[in-house]
Image: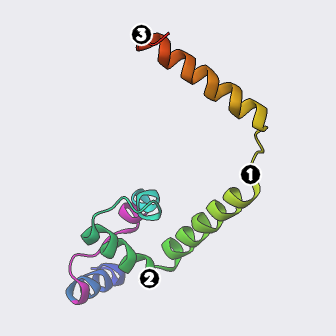
Amino acid sequence: MSEGASADRQVSALFGKATDCDEAVHQLYHFLDGELTEERRIKIAEHLTYCAPCGGAVEFEAELRLVIANHCKDHVPESLIRRIAAAIDEESRQHHGGH
């Protein structure tokens, strides 16, 4: 039996069923988006705490999201917003019979 398998069993004995890296990475975006159940969120968070590569991945993704959110903001002209709102209102009136 390999040392890694033995260590995995020891971790499982301490923390319950261990979450493996494949599962943690698969759930990463759901974790960051707050879309997991409380139980799944806790298990993934424990894995991320004890697994440096996965913990680094979540930190990178979280930081990347912040960079994108802070630097990729397009300014939409007020005139365009008004034209789109008017077009939506007109379309809504036509479909609901309120000419």
User: Is residue 46 inside the magenta stretch?
Assistant: no
Residue at point 30% right, 78% down? 5
Residue at point 28% right, 76% down? 18
Taking depth in this image into account, of 22 and 64 the one nearest to the observer is 64
User: Is residue 18 inside the magenta stretch?
Assistant: yes
Task: Kindly identify which residue carries mark 2.
Answer: 49
Q: Tell me where the magenta segment starts and ends, as one range.
A: 14-24
Residue at point 58% right, 67% down? 62
Task: Kindly identify which residue carries mark 1.
Answer: 72
- Report which quarter residue 64 is drawn in: bottom right
Left or right: 88 as drawn, with respect to 35? right
C-alpha span from label 1 to label 2? 30 Å
44 up-or-down from 79: above or below: below
Name the amino acid, label 1. Answer: Cys
Is the N terminus in the top left, top right, bottom left or bottom right quadrant? bottom left
Task: Kindly identify which residue carries mark 3.
Answer: 97
Taking depth in this image into account, of 39 and 19 the one nearest to the observer is 39
